[in-house]
Amino acid sequence: MMKKQVLNAITQMRIAGKKPTEIANTLGLSVNTVKSHIRRHPDIPNTIYCLNCGKPVPQNEGRKMKKYCCDRCRSSYWNHRYRKGDDCRDLCG
Ligand SMILES: [Zn+2]
């Protein structure tokens, strides 16, 4: 049985876009432990990726879901959303 603190830490890191191996290394757990935890808890929010550049977007607990990694990406996405084939990756470094 894992401690609640550990479960919270896994959840936070998942939201922040960490891979299971990174989470395992950070918490000193085995990758299998982390993976099976994620499997058994489908309620853990999925990582949100920036709609503009695809980078993981860290979420603030209890706040509105953020869909962009930065303001530049948000405005870029809105400016370009109706154009096809635009690559905005270079905008957010
Ligand atoms: Zn972005």
Image (cartoon, rainbow, N blue to C red):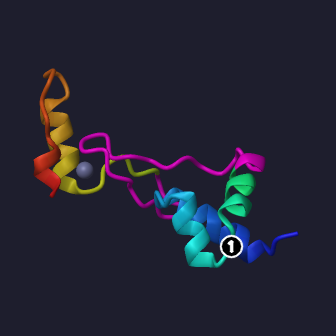
Q: Give me the residue at 72% from left, 47% from top.
A: 39
**Bounds of the magenta span?**
39-64
Q: Give me the residue at 48% from left, 64% from top.
A: 60
Pick out the residue farthest to the right: 1
Q: Give me the residue at 57% from left, 59% from top.
A: 20
- Which image quarter is the C terminus in? bottom left
The residue where tag 1 is placed is 29
For residue 90, above or below residue 51: below
Does the numbered disc 1 mark a residue whose Cβ is under 8 Å from ligand 1? no
Classify residue 53 by image quadrant.
Answer: top left
Q: Quick check: 76 left or right of 17?
A: left
Query: Of helix, strand and loop, which one carries label 1?
Result: loop
Residue 77, image x and y in percent? 20, 38
Q: Any magenta on residue 61?
A: yes
Q: Any magenta on residue 85?
A: no
Classify residue 57 by image quadrant.
Answer: bottom left
Q: Residues within 10 Å of mark 1 (few under 14, many from 20)?
A: some
Classify residue 37 by image quadrant.
Answer: bottom right
Residue in the foreground of this view, choosing between 27 and 56: 27
Residue 11, image x and y in percent? 62, 62
Q: Quick check: 48 left or right of 88?
A: right
Q: Give me the residue at 14% from left, 24% from top.
A: 85
Q: Which secondary structure is most common in the magenta stretch?
A: loop
Q: How many marks are shown on the rendered structure?
A: 1
Residue in the foreground of this view, choosing between 2 and 75: 2
Q: Quick check: 66 left or right of 90?
A: right
Residue 12, image x and y in percent? 57, 65
Q: Hey, what amino acid is under mark 1?
A: Leu
- Which image quarter is the N terminus in? bottom right
Residue 52, image x and y in percent? 24, 41
